[in-house]
Image (tube, rainbow, N blue to C red):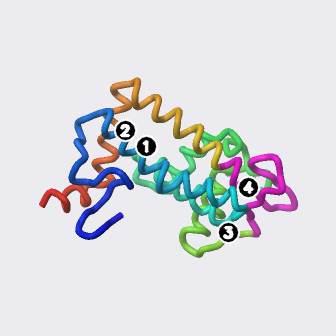
Amino acid sequence: MRIGDTLYFSPNYRFDQINWNNKEELIEAFRDRVEEFYLKPARVLNKHKYPFGSGVLCVTTIDFLAKIETDLDDVGKRFENWLRSNIKEFDSSDPDNSSRTLACRFYKEFRNGLVHEGRIKNCGQFSYDFDELVHQGNGIIIVNPNLLLNAIISSFRKYIQRVESEEFAFLQFRCALIKAFWKDIKYVNR
């Protein structure tokens, strides 16, 4: 985010003020970014019953967290791995194609459809009408964006706890952030 001549990592942390070696500060800046850019707006959209908008933010949150947590270059693999590892409902076989998981299907129909075409493919839907995170029937998947957001928040909190408590996890986290934002860091330090 840019305001005037200043490039922000998150609403409360400028790129030029982050000490990338300060564990507490870096974790707090990351938390601020995820909470304020992704989670808080998705909560507001859910509160006002905008399932599509909330779903789009959930998908981009997963994309971002998967990039940082897995540090895999293949977008599909990291997205699917993150889903399968963090949200149990996606770690099962697709009833319409037993050779793939629901995570793979969600990636292809929801994530790719939304990011590349602004729509969900193959009649997939976001809806608050079901009390389960993933509802399957008649060959379609319906995802409750409020329950998806809650699952993402829970996974995010667990990840932050691990990064705070395990030194190796923090080092991986730090390296992934620097790798992801290298051009931004270089730009502000020119």
| Residue 18 to residue 21: above or below | below
Task: Return the disc, 2 or 3, that comes first in the chain's sequence.
Answer: 2
What type is the residue that disc 1 sits on? Answer: Arg
Q: Please tell me whether mark 4 sits on a helix, a strand or a loop.
A: strand
Please determine whether, in this image, residue 178 is positioned above or below residue 137. Answer: above
Q: Is residue 103 above or below residue 119?
A: above
| Res. 143 mark | 4
Q: Amino acid at mark 2?
A: Ile
- Specify which label sits upstream in the sequence, 3 or 1: 1
Determine the residue positioned at 28% across, 54% down.
14
State the residue position of label 2.
27
Q: Is residue 146 magenta?
A: yes
Mark 3 highlights which residue?
120
* Mark 1 closeness class: few <14, some 14–19, many ≥20 residues within 10 Å: some
Report if the CB atoms under discs 3 and 4 are less than 8 Å apart.
Answer: no
Q: Position of residue 106 (x, y in %)?
A: 65, 56
Q: Which residues are magenta?
A: 123-148
Q: Which mark is residue 31?
A: 1
What residue is drawn where x is 47% and y is 56%?
37
Q: Is the C-beta separation of discs 2 and 1 under 8 Å?
A: yes
